[in-house]
Image (spheres, helix red, strand yellow):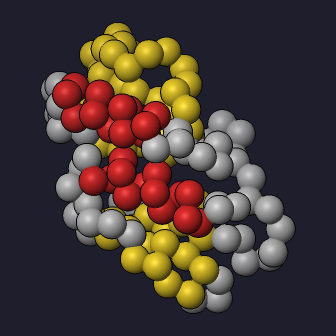
Amino acid sequence: MFHHVNLGSNDLTRSKKFYDAVLAVLGAQPGIELDFNSPRVLYKHEGCLLVITQPLNGLPATVANGGTIGLSMSSPEQTDAFHAAAVANGGTTCEEPPGERETPVGPVYLAYVRDPDGNKLCAFHQPDSSTP
């Protein structure tokens, strides 16, 4: 359903270090630095794009209150590795520690972090992937 997600950053060098590390856990290549209307870092993986950019309006990047970007993980171990890479590269853990949660759609294994600019990411693994 999604083609791409753009996230604002106030420090692209710091963001590239963070996203290169956490997306490597998923098998993504390091970001490509571009200058298209503003400096950006582009990540391409499995048909999806993540773009880290300085805001086009020249104002500081801010986070979306209530916004979360969920990233699919293949296992609890990959979820834990994503969380560890995030914290080791300038991210901060948030919510509960990584682990299994019971939800109305069944058990899920989650890890929440904020990137260095405060954007919230959720590493998401659902053992029974037949449920959305």
Q: Position of residue 57 (x, y in %)?
A: 80, 76
- Residue at 43% x, 37% y is 88
In the rendered view, tell whether residue 55 sits above or below residue 124: below
- Image-quadrant location for residue 60: bottom right
Please identify the residue farthest to the bottom as the structure is shown: 36
Q: Position of residue 94 (x, y in %)?
A: 55, 25
Point out the image quarter for the C terminus. top left
- Residue 91 appears in the rendering: yes
Lateral position of residue 129 relative to residue 4, left or right: left
In the rendered view, tell whether residue 2 sits above or below residue 110: below
Q: Position of residue 100 (x, y in %)?
A: 31, 14
- Image-quadrant location for residue 40: bottom right
- Residue at 20% x, 28% y is 77
- Residue at 36% x, 51% y is 21
- Residue at 50% x, 84% y is 34
Lateral position of residue 77 relative to residue 88, left or right: left
Please identify the residue farthest to the right as the structure is shown: 59
